[in-house]
Image: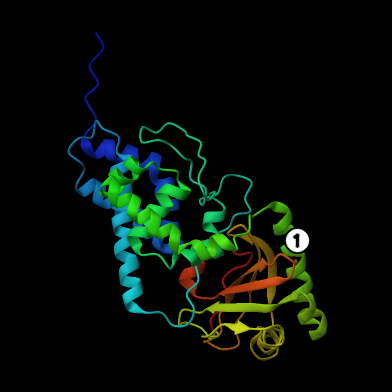
Amino acid sequence: MVAAVPPASPREVVADAFERHKRFLWGLCYRMLGSAADADDLVQETFARALARPPRHTDEPLRPWLVQVATNLARDLLRRRRRGGYVGPWLPSPIPTDDDEPPAHEPVLLDDNGRPITTEARYDLMESVSFAFLLALEALTPRQRAVLLLRDVFDYSVARTADALAMTDAHVKVTHHRARRAMHGYDRVRVRLSRERRQAAGDVLVRFLSALTRGDAEAAEALLAEDVKVLSDGGGEFLAARKPVVGRARVVQFYRNLLTRHAPPDLRAEARVLNGAAAVVVEGTPPRPNIAARTAVVCELNADGQISRLYSVLATRKLSALDWSASPPHSG
């Protein structure tokens, strides 16, 4: 006679559900916060809370409940971040998107019972981790951000969104409408990401950096849009421009000053694909403690194939998702 298998405990059920859904939770938290390190922390806190206070009915799908816990934590963290202020421009933390295997930015989409689903979402998964998209989300309230992501990225229905966020259907519809209205500026100039466009941007970025290193300001300026803008996020930790640098001549002079005054003697650079865009990661032994040992630079092109945006991320916590080719450089 085969012994009956005892039913799983609530903690075991929660642990199993969390393992199946943690990738989705990370993708949601990253898009909510624009920070890989914060997404790591919130996914772990969601698990800790789930184990400490599992839901009463563990025989029902647990994904809506886990999404609700994670989203509430993310909304609280967003509010605290905005109250605390920030030194200089705030930028998302870069994440690698050049792997052959599905990377962490691309959660496997499942229904609440764990079955794979396809979507026809307004924004695809890669676009929704682009710097342009994540920066556009900063105009939304935390609740609007959650609703827009669930409805327009993860393709949740109104009812499913309401269930996940503990809202009424009517409130979801109103919040969604306001969120879409706030995204109008992004939608108006929205550029679809493609492998061809990313490769073109990579080529232009390499040519721009080459012109800078050989001191050819004219060639460097020719690769930039007239209204090109550089945003630098040092988080108050490292020397970085606290205001956007705008215009061809100013941008070229800005980077020439960096190379001549602050570049490490052992500077190393590697082309990467970050957040669906062409990028370069730079590292070296900093000459002074306030100079970053590592920087990620993400590039965007305009419709004419010129560099329109350069995002430089220097803050240590912002770079937690990146693998580096060498051992960490000394900090001074």
Relative image position of residue 115 (x, y in whole percent): 43, 31
Relative depth, front residue between 61 and 169? 169
| Residue 31 x, y percent position in the rendering | 45, 57
Crowdedness near tag 1: few (<14), some (14–19) or many (≥20) residues, C-alpha within 10 Å: some
Is the residue 108 above or below the residue 71 in the image?
A: above
Q: Is residue 228 above or below residue 146?
A: below
Q: Residue at x 36, y 53 (%)?
A: 43
Q: Is residue 323 left or right of residue 259?
A: left
Q: Which residue is mark 1?
A: 200
Q: Is residue 10 left or right of residue 122?
A: left
Q: Secondary structure at mark 1?
A: helix
Q: Quadrant of the C terminus?
A: bottom right
Q: Is residue 267 above or below residue 105?
A: below
Image point (27%, 52%), residue name: 48
Residue 9 falls left or right of residue 248 = left
Instruction: Tell me where residue 100 appears, x and y as whole percent.
Output: 64, 46
Residue 94 visible to the viewer: no
Q: Amino acid at mark 1?
A: Ala
Front-most of 108 and 54? 108
At 23% from the left and 15% from the top, the residue drawn is 3
Quarter placement of the N terminus: top left
- Occupied quadrant, residue 247: bottom right
Q: Pick out the residue farthest to the left.
A: 56
| Residue beneath the point at 64% across and 55% down | 193
What colour scheme has been applied to the protein in the rendered image? rainbow
Residue 46: image x %, image y %?
Answer: 30, 52
